[in-house]
Every structure is written in structure tokens, then in C-alpha cells.
Image: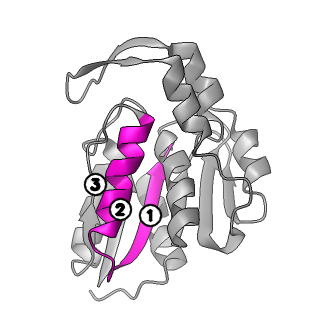
Amino acid sequence: MKKLLTIHGFNSSPKSLKAEQTKAYFNQHFPQIDVVAPQLKTTPDAAIKQLVDIIESAPEASWMLTGSSLGGYFATYLASRFSIPAVLINPAVKPFELLAEVIGEHTNPYTNETYHVTSEHMQQLKRLWVDDIDVDKFMVMVQKGDEVLDYQQAVNKYRDTCLLVQEGGDHSFVGFEKMLPDVVKFFQLENNG
């Protein structure tokens, strides 16, 4: 049994365009694969516990991961901890530096939930840092036009992985749906229809 855990980014949701496109593509081409797309808790510790619990709830499954932005950072930790393959889309490499600039109150545009980002959350994120990654476990897609993250950080960290660097684009990863066949290929999935 194969399962795909798709992890959204900061202040996002399983209702984001990429998550919806991923679910639709897998439902159409790989209906036998269970796509799990949770709404993440708002603190790093709670979010990572939530994700670990999901994976551990089905230990017999062959898990795969996709993670976007902050979700890519979480996916890096999970891929390393559980030795499972991950596709990262415009991943945050050092979110503890990036999000330090947005400490304060936020409202999720998808859920309308209001929450606070604190300096303690930056410490929680730092504890999830993975120094040595298994390069064979990762496919990483970045667009140079990302206005939120410095794509070069991802290129540097994941340089020895299956790395795709595209000109233009933005943080949402323009044309993501066109990349889904490549995602499937990386996961070595057989198309059943």
C-alpha cells in the first residue's frame, strides 16, 4: 500500500492550488494511492508531531512526501527520519531565519484561524534542521523568480539531488501541474490508467 503525504507551506492549506492539483492528478492516474493532505497545526512542534503521527499510524505503508516552502523543510526532516522519498517545491531551507521577520499575529487566509508566530517557534524550527541528507531520497524543484525565498539556498543545499531549476516563475511554482508526471517518475510509480 502506497501513501502520499503532501505538506503545505506557511500560512497555507490543503486547499492550496498545488495541493488540489496533486490530489486531482493522483485521483485520476493513481486512485490506488491514498493522498493525505492535513491542515497543519500552527506551531512547528505541533505540526511535526502531527506529521510523524500520520506516518506512524500506517507503518505498513510505503510513504512518499511532497512539501512546498515550509512544507519542504518539514518534508526534509521526515524523509531523513523515516528514510522515505520526498519531492520539494520551492523549499524553505532556513525558515528559522526567514520567519523571524514575521513574528507576530497572522490569520490563515484559507481557514481564517488567527495565531501567533513567536521566537520560540524559531528554536523549534532549528531543532528540525538536517545537516546530511540522503541525496537519492530527494527531488527538488525551484523557480528563480521565487519572490519569497532565495532559490540559491535550495540549489546549494540540494545540489546533489535530482534538482530542477526553472527560469522565471514565483513562490507558488508556476505550472506545477505540468511537473506532476516528473514527480510520479521520481516516485517510480506505474500508471494504471
Marked residue nearer the N-terminal end (1 or 3) = 3
Corner quadrant of residue 146: top right
Corner quadrant of residue 4: bottom left
**Residue that badge 2 annotates:** 5
**Residue that badge 3 annotates:** 37
Disc 1 vs disc 2: Cβ atoms closer than 8 Å? yes
The residue lying at 57 percent from left, 30 percent from top is 123
Badge count: 3
Which element carries disc 3, helix, strand or loop? Answer: loop
Corner quadrant of residue 34: bottom left
The residue lying at 41 percent from left, 47 percent from top is 48
Q: Amino acid at mark 2?
A: Leu
- Report if residue 146 is visible in the image: no
Q: Nearer the viewer, residue 148 or 28?
A: 148
Q: Would residue 67 be counted in the magenta stretch?
A: yes
Image coordinates of residue 66 in percent, x first then y, are 45, 59
Q: Amino acid at mark 3?
A: Ala
Disc 2 vs disc 3: Cβ atoms closer than 8 Å? yes
**Residue that badge 1 annotates:** 65
For the N terminus, the image quarter is bottom left
For the C terminus, the image quarter is bottom left
Q: What residue span does the magenta drawing correspond to?
A: 44-69
Q: Is residue 7 above or below residue 179?
A: above
- Report if residue 89 is visible in the image: yes
Image coordinates of residue 46 in percent, x first then y, are 35, 40
Q: Is residue 162 above or below residue 108?
A: below
Q: Nearer the viewer, residue 92 or 130?
A: 130
